[in-house]
Amino acid sequence: MATDDVTRRRFAFYWLVVQPGSTAIRWEVLTAVQLRAQAA
């Protein structure tokens, strides 16, 4: 939890940068899990 405005802004910037990669990795992992489950 951000405790002040500076921290809140820094975290918002961090998440703006990290989110696209995080989303892509999550989709890749979930797709792999789905394909493996369907193959079993």
Image (tube, grey):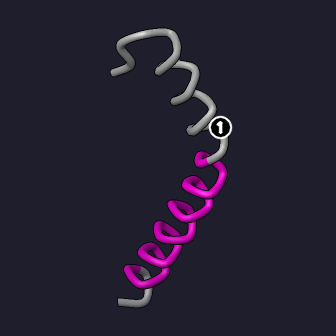
The picture places residue 30, in percent across and down from the top left corner, at 47, 66
Count of all numbered marks drawn on residues in the image: 1
Q: In the rendered image of this protein, does residue 36 appear above or below residue 13?
A: below
Residue at image x 49%, y 78%?
Answer: 32
Q: Nearer the viewer, residue 29 or 9?
A: 9
Residue at image x 59%, y 48%?
Answer: 18
| Residue occupied by mark 1 | 16
The picture places residue 19, in percent across and down from the top left corner, at 60, 46
* Quadrant placement of the C terminus: bottom left
Q: In the rendered image of this protein, does residue 33 appear above or below residue 8?
A: below
For the stretch drawn in magenta, what is the main secondary structure? helix
User: Going by the image, does 12 lie left or right of 3?
Assistant: right
The quarter holding residue 37 reads bottom left
In the image, residue 30 lies in the stretch drawn in magenta: yes
> What residue occupies the far front of the structure in this picture?
6
The quarter holding residue 10 reads top right
In the image, residue 22 lies in the stretch drawn in magenta: yes
> What residue occupies the far top of the structure in this picture?
5
Residue at image x 55%, y 65%?
Answer: 25
Q: In the rendered image of this protein, does residue 9 appear above or below residue 26?
A: above
- Regarding mark 1 in the picture, which secondary structure is present there? helix
The picture places residue 4, in percent across and down from the top left corner, at 42, 10
Residue at image x 33%, y 21%?
Answer: 1
Q: In the rendered image of this protein, does residue 31 appear above or below residue 21?
A: below
What span is colored magenta in the figure? 18-37
Mark 1 nearby-residue class (10 Å; few <14, some 14–19, many ≥20): few
The picture places residue 20, in percent across and down from the top left corner, at 66, 50
Q: Amino acid at mark 1?
A: Leu
> What residue occupies the far bottom of the structure in this picture?
40
